[in-house]
Image (cartoon, rainbow, N blue to C red):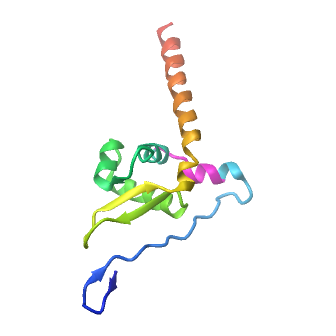
Amino acid sequence: MTVTSTGKQTPTQRIRPARANPVGGCPLTAALAAVGGKWKMIIIYSLSASPEHFASLQKLTFGISQKVLTQQLRELESDGIVRRRPTGAVPAPVEYSLSDYGRSLLPLIESMRLWGKTHMQRTATKAAA
């Protein structure tokens, strides 16, 4: 928070440092660190249509805890994939949206979604046989 000359508190923009690649020089591990795991692609997909407030994101990503959603959003923000914007007075509701950089992931995520759909059908067919 920043205190103005009138004594009012205004939110300051948080700048989170970029996270390091866990295996230096390996593009695959850099990508997996940025978007891997159970929730990150779902969060990105949920933000693809429009910006969302925290509570809306928690509903869209059913089953995620508040702690994990907060952690994942912070990591996505530090990697420049998600933007965080307070939308009112303190304590401000916060709106999350995809950055242009984050939007560059949408073709990859759509390909993963389609592959997952085919994989589900394939495994269901094998289980029925």
Residue at the (56%, 28%) spot, across then down: 115
**Looking at the picture, how far across and down is residue 28, in whole percent?**
68, 48
| Residue farthest along the bottom direction in this orientation | 5
| Prevalent SS, magenta region | helix
Residue at left offset 49%, top offset 72%: 15
Question: Which quadrant holds the N terminus?
Answer: bottom left
| In the image, residue 10 above or below residue 30 | below
Residue 84 point in image, percent of width and height: 41, 63
Residue at horizontal 57%, vertical 55%?
101
Q: Residue shown at 50%/70% (left/top)? A: 16
**Front residue of 26 and 2:** 2
Residue 68 is left or right of residue 115, and the answer is: left
Q: Position of residue 34 (x, y in %)?
A: 57, 53
Q: Most extreme residue toward the right, as rendered?
A: 25
* Horizontal arrangement in the rendering, residue 37 relative to residue 94 (left or right): right
Q: Quadrant of residue 96?
A: bottom left
Query: Which one is nearer the viewer's eye here, 3 or 71?
Result: 3
Q: Is residue 35 magenta?
A: yes
